[in-house]
Amino acid sequence: MKGLFLPAYRLMGRLSYSRKMVLIALLFVTPLLVTLYFLNSRLQADIELIQLVTGLALVALMTAAYLFAGFYFSVMDSLTGISTAARRLAKGDMTVRVECATQDECAVVADTFNTMAEQFEQVLGQVKSTSAQLGSATGQMNSTSERTRSGVLEQRSQTEQMATA
């Protein structure tokens, strides 16, 4: 072991105490400073990476929030239109139809609502037509019934006159 460190040991024997302390300090401090330098540069790189990832995460979060808000308002507009039309249909406005500019599930619901409203309007038209026909038939029946009644009363009157004569 002495053979390996012999040159350093002879050199140390020739130096003064203060120089020995400086040499020992340099031998121990230099690797420590180099290690600190590399750790510091690695720390800076890690901080930059964290900042980059954080920035990208914020951009992704903001994009997701924007898309969610757009989706939410689009669906709410469609549902509000359908809801308003349903209230008008419930109040008796059979001409109400829903206009939907989207090509999603809300458009399917709007088309189905429009088909239902058209069928309600057709049924209501048939009911009105049948009601008008029924009213006409009732009027004719009343007229026929009145004529029959008049005829029966006249026949009764004639029968009574013949019976008294």
Image (cartoon, rainbow, N blue to C red):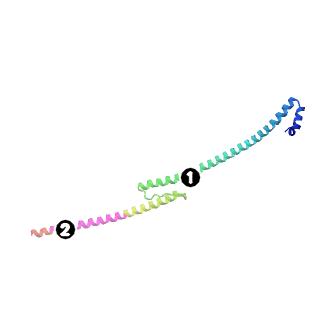
Give the residue number, with chain letter if any, for mark 2: 152
Q: Which of 95 and 44 is in front in this view?
A: 44
Q: Position of residue 69 (x, y in %)?
A: 57, 49
Residue at the extreme right = 14
Could you say whether the residue bearing mark 1 is in a helix, strand or loop?
helix
Q: Earlier in the sequence, mark 1 or mark 2?
A: 1
Q: Is residue 30 above or below residue 62?
A: above
Residue that extends furthest to the top in the rendered view of this protein: 17
Rendered residue at 59%/51% (across/down)? 67
The stretch drawn in magenta includes residue 131: yes
Image quadrant assignment for residue 15? top right
Indicate which label's residue lies in the foreground, 1 or 2: 1
Query: Is residue 113 depicted above or below 30 in this figure?
Result: below
Residue at 40% across, 62% down:
123
Task: Give how far across and how far down residue 164 sits, in percent.
Answer: 9, 68
Please provide the residue range marked out in magenta.
Answer: 128-157
* Kind of residue at disc 1: Phe
Residue 58 part of the magenta-drawn span:
no
Q: Residue 26 carries which label?
A: none
Residue highlighted by disc 1:
71
Dot 2: within a 10 Å radius of its alpha carbon, few (fewer than 14), some, or many (20 or more) residues?
Answer: few
* Residue at position x 62%, y 49% in the image: 63
State which quarter of the image contains the N terminus. top right
